[in-house]
Image (cartoon, rainbow, N blue to C red):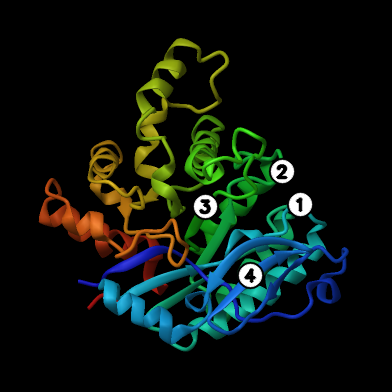
C-alpha cells in the first residue's frame, strides 16, 4: 500500500526580491537567514514564522518521510504567499515564482513529492490560465485559500475557477488563511486553535449552503484541510436549520447532509475520537491522511492516530492512509505499489 500525505507545505530556500518581480511596495515576504538549517519568514520588517530546512531541503524531507512511513507527499504552497489582498497582476507574478520553485524542489524526488500550485484567485481568468500553465509544467493540482477578502467560495468568480478545475481534472486543496485577529485571538495561539478550524468550517458552509455543489460537476475533486473544521460535528445543526429556516439558510437544493459525498477532508485532527466521527459522518471513502508537515502544529509521526486507532477496520485504515488519495489525485497522481 502506498501511504500518501495530502497536506504538507514547502517554502523555498531562496526567492527573488518580490518587490522587483511584482512591484507593490516593500512589505512582501522575504527570508532572513536562509537557506541554512533555519530561517525566518519576514513580512516587511515583521517576523512571521521561524522555519527549518525541512521546508526546502529535499533530503531532510525524505528522511522524515522514511522515518514516518510515508511514501508520497502532496507538497502545497505556504498560504502567506497567496497575495489575494493585492492586485491580481502582482499575485500572478508571485505565483509564477513560487510555482516554478516548487517544481524545482519536487523534481529532486518526482515519485515521492507531488507539487500543487497556487493561483491569483482574485482574478478567475488569470487563475485558470496559471493553473493550466502549471498542470502542463508538472503540477498535480492546486491549493487555494478559503476566501478572498469578503468573497467566500460561493463567489461567482471562484465558482468559475472551480468549474474549470473540474473540467481539466485538477484536484483542489482548500486551506484556511488570512485569519481574523484581535485581543481574544492573539492569546494561546487561538488563531490556529480556533480560527483555522472555524475558517475551514465557513468555507464548507459556503460550498454547501451557497449552492456551489449544485453548480459544479460531481467530477470536482476537492479536499478541505484540518478535518473540515467542525463541519462533521455540527452537520445535524445545519440540517435542522436548513429544514426549519430554509427561507434564510442558504440556497442549496438539498439539506447539507446530502452533500457529504462531494468532498474530502484530511485526517489531521490529532485524536482517535474526532477521526472516528469524521469517518462515521462523512464516510471512510472521504478522509485522507494529512499532517500539516513541516510545521510545529502538524502531526508527527505522520499518521500516528490513523495507524494507532483501535476503532478503524483494516479496510478503513487502508483507505485513509492511501487509497482515497489515489482517487483524489486522479490518473496523474501517485502510482500505487
Name the side, left or right, on which 147 lies relative to 330. right
Specify which label sits upstream in the sequence, 1 or 3.
Answer: 1
- Label 3 Cα crowd, 10 Å radius (few <14 / some 14-19 / many 20+): many
Front one among 122 and 60: 60
Name the side, left or right, on which 316 lies relative to 10. left
How far apart are the two marked residues, 2 and 3, measured between alpha carbons?
15 Å
Residue 167 percent across, percent down from the top left? 53, 59
Front one among 32 and 221: 32
How far apart are the two marked residues, 2 and 4, measured between alpha carbons?
26 Å
Please count the marks in the image: 4
Specify which label sits upstream in the sequence, 1 or 2.
Answer: 1
| Local secondary structure at mark 1 | loop
Which mark lies nearer to you, 1 or 3?
1
Which mark lies nearer to you, 2 or 4?
4
How far apart are the two marked residues, 1 and 3, measured between alpha carbons?
17 Å
Residue 159 percent across, percent down from the top left? 61, 46
Residue 164 percent across, percent down from the top left? 59, 57
Q: Residue at x 70, y 80 (%)?
A: 15
For mark 4, what is the residue?
A: 40
- Please give the label number shown on residue 174: 3
Q: Are marks 1 and 2 in contact (CB under 8 Å)?
A: yes
For mark 1, what is the residue?
A: 85
Amino acid at each position: 500500500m502506498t501511504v500518501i500525505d495530502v497536506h504538507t507545505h514547502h517554502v523555498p530556500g531562496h526567492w527573488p526580491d518580490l518587490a522587483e518581480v511584482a512591484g507593490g511596495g516593500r512589505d512582501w515576504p522575504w527570508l532572513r537567514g536562509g537557506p541554512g538549517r533555519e530561517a525566518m519568514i519576514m513580512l516587511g520588517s515583521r517576523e512571521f514564522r521561524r522555519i527549518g530546512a525541512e521546508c526546502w531541503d529535499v533530503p531532510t524531507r525524505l528522511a522524515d518521510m522514511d522515518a514516518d512511513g510515508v511514501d508520497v507527499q502532496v507538497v502545497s504552497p505556504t498560504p502567506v504567499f497567496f497575495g489575494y489582498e493585492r492586485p491580481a497582476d502582482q499575485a500572478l507574478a508571485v505565483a509564477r515564482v513560487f510555482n516554478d520553485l516548487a517544481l524545482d524542489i519536487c523534481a529532486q524526488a518526482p515519485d515521492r513529492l507531488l507539487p500543487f500550485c497556487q493561483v491569483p484567485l482574485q482574478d478567475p481568468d488569470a487563475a485558470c490560465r496559471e493553473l493550466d500553465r502549471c498542470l502542463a509544467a508538472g503540477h498535480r493540482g492546486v491549493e487555494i485559500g478559503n476566501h478572498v477578502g469578503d468573497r467566500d467560495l460561493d463567489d461567482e468568480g471562484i465558482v468559475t475557477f472551480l468549474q474549470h478545475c473540474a473540467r481539466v481534472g485538477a484536484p483542489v486543496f482548500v486551506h484556511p488563511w488570512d485569519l481574523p485577529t484581535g485581543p481574544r485571538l492573539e492569546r494561546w495561539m487561538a488563531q490556529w486553535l480556533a480560527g483555522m478550524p472555524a475558517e475551514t468550517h465557513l468555507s464548507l458552509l459556503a460550498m454547501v449552503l451557497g449552492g456551489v455543489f449544485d453548480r459544479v460537476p460531481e467530477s470536482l475533486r476537492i479536499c478541505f484541510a484540518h478535518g473540515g473544521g467542525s463541519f462533521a460535528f455540527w452537520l445535524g445543526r445545519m440540517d435542522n436549520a436548513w429544514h426549519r429556516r430554509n427561507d434564510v439558510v442558504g440556497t442549496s437544493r438539498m439539506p447539507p447532509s446530502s452533500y457529504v459525498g462531494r468532498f474530502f477532508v484530511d485526517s489531521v485532527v490529532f485524536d482517535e475520537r474526532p477521526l472516528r466521527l469524521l469517518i462515521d459522518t462523512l464516510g471512510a471513502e472521504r478522509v485522507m491522511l494529512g499532517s500539516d508537515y513541516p510545521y510545529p502544529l502538524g502531526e508527527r509521526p505522520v499518521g500516528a492516530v490513523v495507524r494507532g486507532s483501535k476503532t478503524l477496520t483494516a479496510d478503513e485504515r487502508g483507505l485513509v492512509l492511501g487509497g482515497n488519495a489515489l482517487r483524489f489525485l486522479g490518473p496523474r497522481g501517485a502510482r500505487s505499489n
